[in-house]
Image (cartoon, rainbow, N blue to C red):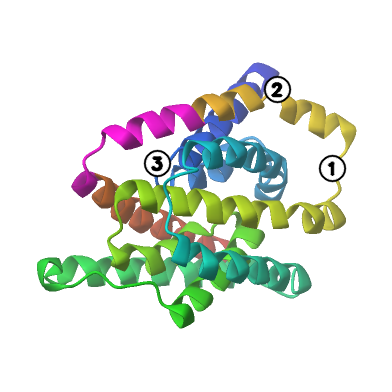
């Protein structure tokens, strides 16, 4: 692959990461698969972490007044614990098993939502026990493969929050989780000066994506926003299961 093609792929991946921090659901999870067309998934995940962190800064600023405080109090410490668990078990955990499990949970959750009469289902309040379980799992899977969105969405979607509060809570929670991953990633897969210089060229793509994501999120009707979240969750879950099954071959 030529340098120009690699740069375009990396720029697209960074733009998608930024868009997810701007509020568009799940599109950031496409970044690693796209960049994996040019390098190994592990290399792609390591390369993109600084882009996630930089995009988080823009996302937190965009949604600094739009979030669910009760959920933050539950999900932030849970997510950090999940990162710690991922770090402690990095050499023992099978990526394949985690991907398959998370994919199955996401698909089952979506099917349950679609097959039930949602008009008769009341919005659920934040729940300490459920929040800690799914938040810890989100931090863990985010550490393993930047795939924290499915567990997070399984917990958050039943609350039927306003879309801005949903997007803002997501952005802030994963900003903290990604910040918590910096030291563990550096200890497991150290960054070189050359790699950080390469990453710097992708920052404008990420920032442009963040503002584009926020612009689009504000203009999507709530009903369609949550449909997009659900279908994104379903598609990403199918992708995780497919990748896991391919790894067994």
Residue at 43% x, 27% y is 212
Describe the element under mark 2 as helix, strand or loop: loop
Name the residue at the top extreme. Answer: 4
Q: Is residue 9 magenta?
A: no
**Callout count:** 3
Query: Measured from the top left, where is residue 85 in percent x and y?
Result: 70, 73
Q: Which mark is residue 24?
A: 3
Q: Are marks 3 and 1 in contact (CB under 8 Å)?
A: no
Residue beneath label 1, please? 191
93 is higher (above) or lower (below) than 194: below
Q: Main secondary structure of the magenta part?
A: helix
Query: At 29% across and 73% down in the image, what residue appears?
Result: 124
Among the two numbered marks 1 and 2 on one chain, the one whose residue lies closer to the N terminus: 1
Residue at image coords 88%, 38%: 192
Question: Which image quadrant for residue 105?
Answer: bottom left
Marks 2 and 3, how far apart in space?
23 Å
- 44 vs 234, left or right, is right
Distance from the alpha carbon under mark 3 to that under mark 1: 29 Å
- Residue at mark 2: 201
Which of the two residues, 26 or 249, is positioned nearer the viewer here?
A: 26
Mark 3, Cα crowd under 10 Å, few <14 / some 14-19 / many 20+, is: many
> Which numbered disc, 2 or 3, marks the residue closer to the eye?
3
Residue 233: x %, y % from top left: 37, 56
Local secondary structure at mark 1: loop
Left or right side of 161 for 154: right
Crowding at label 1, few (<14), some or many (≥20) Cα neighbours within 10 Å? few
Q: Residue furthest bottom?
A: 129
Q: Tell me where the magenta segment starts and ends, as one range.
A: 210-224
Residue 39 position in % (x across, y down): 68, 39
Q: Nearest the camera: 247 or 130?
A: 130
């Amino acid at each position: 692959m030529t340098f120009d093609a690699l740069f375009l792929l990396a720029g697209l991946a960074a733009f998608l990461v930024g868009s997810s921090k701007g509020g568009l659901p799940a599109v950031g999870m496409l970044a690693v698969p796209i960049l994996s067309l040019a390098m190994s998934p592990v290399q792609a995940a390591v390369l993109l972490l600084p882009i996630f962190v930089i995009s988080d800064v823009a996302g937190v600023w965009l949604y600094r007044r739009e979030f669910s405080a009760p959920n933050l109090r539950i999900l932030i410490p849970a997510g950090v614990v999940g990162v710690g668990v991922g770090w402690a078990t990095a050499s023992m955990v099978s990526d394949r098993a985690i991907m398959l499990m998370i994919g199955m949970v996401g698909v089952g959750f979506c099917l349950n939502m679609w097959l039930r009469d949602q008009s008769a289902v009341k919005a659920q309040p934040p729940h300490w026990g459920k929040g800690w379980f799914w938040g810890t799992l989100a931090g863990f899977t985010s550490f393993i493969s930047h795939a924290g969105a499915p567990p997070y969405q399984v917990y958050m979607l039943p609350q039927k929050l306003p879309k801005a509060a949903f997007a803002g809570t997501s952005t802030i929670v994963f900003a903290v989780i990604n910040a918590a991953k910096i030291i563990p990633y550096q200890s497991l897969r150290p960054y070189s000066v050359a790699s950080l210089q390469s990453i710097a060229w992708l920052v404008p793509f990420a920032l442009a994506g963040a503002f584009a994501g926020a612009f689009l999120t504000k203009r999507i009707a709530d009903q369609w926003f949550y449909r997009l979240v659900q279908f994104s969750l379903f598609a990403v879950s199918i992708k995780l299961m497919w990748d896991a099954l391919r790894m067994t071959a």
